[in-house]
Amino acid sequence: MENELIDRYGRKLDYLRLSVTDRCNFRCYYCMPEEGMDFVQRKALLTYEELDYLTGIFVKLGVTKIRITGGEPFVRKGIMDFFTKLRQHQDLREITLTSNGSISEDQIQQLKHLGIKKINISLDALDKQRFFEITRRDKFDEVFHCILTLLKQGFYVKLNCVVDGNKNIADIIPFVQLTADYPLAVRFLEEMPFNGTGKFEIPEWNHLALYDYIASHFPEIQKIQDGKNSTSVNYQIPGYQGTFGIIPAFSRTFCGTCNRIRLSATGELRTCLYGPPVTNLRDILRAGANKESIMTEIRNAVVKKEKDGFKAEELNSKTPKKSMSFLGG
Ligand code: SAM
Ligand code: SF4
C-alpha cells in the first residue's frame, strides 16, 4: 500500500519515536556515564521545523502515533511550541511523551490544554537515596510531585522502572503497592546495553525472575489483557487501582508485533533499537531531497527491518553501543 509502512514480515509500522535532544539534566547510570558525555553540537540537531516536516512525511506514510523522547525533551528550549505544532497534523491520532519528570506545573497545564493525555515518567526507586544513586541527581521530590500533579490533572501515567539486581530490588514491591492507591501503570524493564560506556552484564533480573519475585509476594496476581502492540506483559492485584507490567526489553520476546520506528535527534533512522541506523534523514533533507525521495528512503529502510532485535544486533556487533539518550529511548 502506498500510504502504509509494512516490513517484509508483514508488520505495519505506525508508531514513531521521535527524539528531540540527546541532552539531559539527569545522569541515570544505565543510560549515560556520570561525566564526559559527548553531546552533539546544536547544528547537528534537527531543528523544530525539520522535525515537524519529517513528522508530516511519516504521517503521510501511515504513522498515527508519535512519542516524543530524548534525552530529556523538557531541557530543549521551545518544546511546548513544538507540541503545539505537532497538534496540527490532523491524521496523527496520538501524541505521547516520555520524560524524567522535569515538567513544570505550567507545562503540565499547557500539555493538558493541547489534549496530550498519556505521559510516561521514568522512576526507578521510591527510596530517595536509591533514586539519587541511580540518577545521580537529588530530584526525587520534584519527580514524585510531577507524577502526582499529572494524575491530579487527569493524565494517564505510566512509570518506567529499569530493574537492576544491584540497585533497586528493594523498590519492586513498594512500586506494586503504589498501584493500590494510584491509577498508575508501573512497568518494570530489563536493562538494555545502551549506557554509553561499552560495559554491560546480561541482566539476572530478567522478566521471568521479576514475575516470580512479584508473584511470590502477591499470590493473588492476575493477568490482564495486553494492548495490541504492547511490549509489556501486564498484571493487576485485585482491588488495586493501578496495574503493572514487565517489559522483556533485553530478552526481546515482543519483536513479532513490533510497530515502531525511531528517529534520533540527529536524523538517524532506526527500525530497531538494537540495530544500526539505516539512513540519516537530516543529511538527505539538508542535501535538498524532495518529499517523494524522503518517502522512498523511509519505505526502503522499513522493508529491510530485521525479524527481531537479535538479528538487528548482529548487524551492529562491531560498533560500541551508544547511550540511550542519543538513540531516543
Ligand atoms: N529522559 C526521558 C526519561 O528518562 O524518561 C526520556 C528518554 S529515556 C532515554 C527513555 C526511557 O529509556 C526511560 O524510561 C529510561 O528509563 C529508558 N532507558 C534508558 N536507558 C536504558 C537502558 N540501558 N535499559 C533500559 N531502559 C533504558
Ligand atoms: Fe536522562 Fe532519561 Fe537517560 Fe535518565 S534515562 S539520563 S533521565 S535521558
Image (tube, helix red, strand yellow):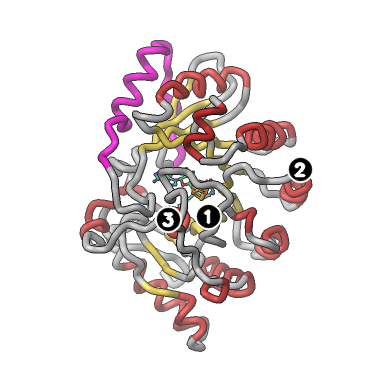
Q: How many C-alpha atoms fall within 10 Å of the one at disc 2: few (<14), some, or many (≥20)?
A: few
Please identify, in this view, whether the residue under mark 3 or under mark 2 is nearer the observer: 2
Whether the residue carrying mark 1 lies under 8 Å from ligand 2 is answered with: yes
Residue plotted at (43% across, 69% down): 268
First in sequence, mark 3 or 2: give its number.
Answer: 2
What residue is shown with label 1? Answer: 71
Residue 248 against residue 77 in the figure, above or below: above
**Distance (Cα) linking label 1 and label 3:** 18 Å
Label 1 crowd (10 A; few <14 / some 14-19 / many >=20): many
Q: Secondary structure at mark 2?
A: helix
Per the rendering, the mark at residue 105 is: 2
Q: Residue at x 51, y 74 (%)?
A: 44
Say which element carries label 3. strand
Pointer 3 local density, CA inside 10 Å: few below 14, some 14–19, many at least 20: many
Give the residues in magenta: 201-229
Amino acid on which the number 2 mark rests in the picture: Glu
Q: Nearer the viewer, residue 208 or 325?
A: 325
Query: Where is mark 3, residue-wise?
Result: 260
The amino acid sitting under disc 3 is: Arg
Q: Earlier in the sequence, mark 1 or mark 3?
A: 1
